[in-house]
Amino acid sequence: MACEARRGVCQACYGRLPATGEVVELGQATGIIAAQSIGEPGTQLTMRTFHTGGVAGTDITSGLPRVEELFEARVSKGAALLTDIDGLVEITEDEDLRRLRVVSREEYREEYKLPAGCQVLVDDGEYVEPGMVLATPKARKTKKEAETAEIAENLVSNMAGRVQLSKGSLSIVWEDVEEREHIISRSALLLVNTGDEVTAGQALTQGPLNPHDILNIRGKDELQKYLVDEVQQVYRSQGVAIHDKHIEIILRQMLRRVQVESTGDTELIPGQMVDKFEFQDRNARVLAEGGEPATAKPMLLGVTRASLLTDSFLAAASFQETTRVLTQAAVSGAHDWLLGLKENVIIGRLIPAQVDSLQMEEEALPEPVLSMVENTADDWLEIASQGLGPVGSSQDVGGAAGSMLSVVDEATDTNDTATIEEDSGEWDPEGDSPNIFSPVDE
């Protein structure tokens, strides 16, 4: 989850493959391994939903529907109510509803040192306003004019609050009160009572937790622990053991995007969802220029929505909503850099997996395929002599060109023309015809 690799995960974060116990190799398709490790045992899970009887009965989702609910980041029916602040609980009941308030009181104190012999003008426990004089300096007993350094200023309150006097000091104490009020139906089962002290993220009512609330209140680390525990609980109930790293890889993709809150000096739009690494790059460029960075909050997306928001429009189109994805890609002029597995399978290229070294990775990268008409006469002479393919091409046509052009004049003057030994075609290096090889009339 905490890996900072932009593509995939690094060896240090992934560690060893559970199947072999060896350190994972570079290029290993860990995402596919994670999906298969979760999906294959999922065929053994139950499809049932249990119902607790009675008028106030509830449905308990378990088995495969519960796993789907977790990975799609859905809010369960009858989700528990979470508090987003620390404080004390106050419950009041009406005829039909119950009101639950969480009140947070933070006490602050500002202390003033009293100079010796000063005269205090306020009493202990008195409420003062900002700007009120609290004490005056000691009165002079002589008529001698005071020096500038001897002139003491009056002690003035900077905050509103109640006065607390102690030996040699005076304090202003005030409270910052924050409260949240929730309307709760009488059928909901409360987990707290009046006077209970609660912390941010604690459940106030019984029920499954909302993963989006956990992310907003507790943060990404607590959300990861909750989702991993919930998924493992379903599989353990069926006697299936899955390594946590497989679940965490899926969760990492679900938490890959952030939502912009303030744009700063960037070109982002408030509410826009962007990749977190792209967001960091834009902020880095703005900071390098001395601008104000943007701020964003993490987003939790279900696996379906996360797959549709991938950078590759070919991979997204092969999943769901093909017409919409391709139309949007065409309108926006999107580019697909073919970095993943699905998009390479679609166009018939080797998948970029199991690359053991940087040299192999460079060899695996395809060269751009250029048109044959872009080669000059000198290029074709070199092709024929060396038996290579077209310059800048990955197509192996050198063998055919070498056997066809077995005898070639080295001179390339305006009056010289290359001849074809097998009479299979004519080649005019100065011709402006788009076809390099033209058939010979029999």
Image (cartoon, rainbow, N blue to C red):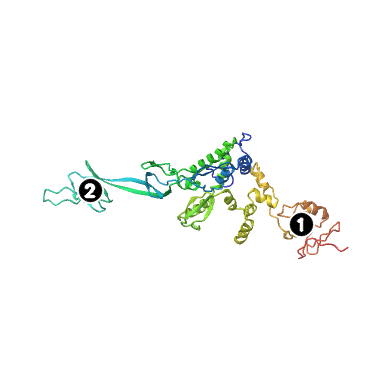
Q: Specify the label residue 380 is tagged with.
A: 1
Q: Position of residue 170 (x, y in %)?
A: 24, 45
Describe the element under mark 1 as helix, strand or loop. Answer: helix
**Of the residues shown, which amino acid type is indicated by label 2?**
Glu
Q: Residue furthest bottom?
A: 432
Number of callouts: 2
Q: Position of residue 360 (x, y in %)?
A: 67, 44
Q: Position of residue 300 (x, y in %)?
A: 52, 49
Q: Is residue 180 above or below residue 197?
A: below
Q: Residue furthest front?
A: 55
Residue sitting nearer the eye, 115 or 18: 18
Bin the neighbour count of mark 1 within 10 Å (Cα to Cα): few under 14, some 14-19, many 20 and up. Answer: many
Q: Which residue bears the numbered disc 2?
A: 126
The residue under the point 59% across, 60% down is: 332
The residue under the point 72% across, 59% down is: 371
* C-alpha distance separating marks 2 and 1: 99 Å
Of the two numbered discs 2 and 1 on the same chain, state the one appearing first in sequence: 2
Describe the element under mark 2 as helix, strand or loop. Answer: loop
Q: Is 370 left or right of 249, judged from the image as shown? A: right
**Of the residues shown, which amino acid type is indicated by label 1?**
Trp
Q: Is residue 19 above or below residue 131?
A: above
Q: In the picture, which quadrant includes the C terminus?
A: bottom right
Q: Is 289 left or right of 164, judged from the image as shown? A: right
The image quarter containing residue 237 is top right
The residue under the point 32% across, 45% down is: 107
Q: CB under 8 Å between callouts 2 and 1? A: no
Residue sitting nearer the eye, 272 or 386: 272
